[in-house]
Image: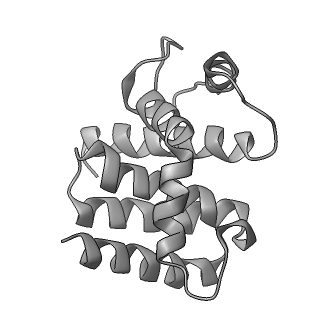
Amino acid sequence: MGKEKTKRHQARVAAFQVLYSLSFTQAPTEDDVKNSYLAIPTNEDNPQEETKETSGFAWELVHGVWSQCQAIDARIQERLTNWRIERLGTIERTLLRLAFFELFFLHQTPPKVIMAETLDLCKEFAEPSAKKFIHGILEAAMKQES
């Protein structure tokens, strides 16, 4: 894994952790989101945002998902058959939100890389059965949008 990919992967991990935690606490203002983001511990294994500022890729992901959450959820819901987004597990919903934000709002990373990164995060944080579900939703989204 190259150094740049490692940094971006670690940024995605950090963003996932913040967004996951925000699923359990209210964050009605950007300051609330910033405080949650700034509370992420940094260490040698997590090189993202060593300066603890709200800048960089991890912050871009956190802020983007938070600010576009309703639009992202609507896009996810379009791809769910006989299922409501509220019924998804918190981990799966958070992973999909991150991926959908990168796919449809950020446009910096090729879709295949987003898919691979999301599935890597799925391996790290979700139950093994979630991988197939997440893959299917992302694959449908990528086909529909291409």
At 61% from the left and 26% from the top, the residue drawn is 37
Q: In the rendered view, would you say 46 is above or below 144?
A: above
Q: Say if residue 58 shows up in the picture.
A: yes
Query: Which corner quadrant holds the C terminus?
Result: bottom left
At 45% from the left and 77% from the top, the residue drawn is 137
In this view, the residue farthest toward the right is: 25
Judged left or right of residue 19, residue 12 is left
Judged left or right of residue 108, residue 50 is right
At 41% from the left and 31% from the top, the residue drawn is 60
At 35% from the left and 73% from the top, the residue drawn is 141
Q: In the rendered view, would you say 29 is above or below 25?
A: above
Q: How many marks?
A: 0
Q: Residue 42 appears at what percent x and percent y?
A: 59, 24
In this view, the residue farthest toward the bottom is: 82
Judged left or right of residue 122, residue 99 is left
Q: Residue 1 appears at what percent x and percent y?
A: 28, 52
Q: Say if residue 45 shows up in the picture.
A: no
Say which quarter of the image contains residue 135. bottom left
Q: Residue 2 appears at what percent x and percent y?
A: 24, 46
Q: Residue 9 appears at what percent x and percent y?
A: 40, 46
- Say which of 121 and 42 sits in front: 121
Judged left or right of residue 48, residue 124 is right
Q: In the rendered view, would you say 83 is above or below 74?
A: below
- Say which of 56 and 1 sits in front: 56
- Say which of 144 and 109 sits in front: 144
Say which quarter of the image contains residue 32. top right
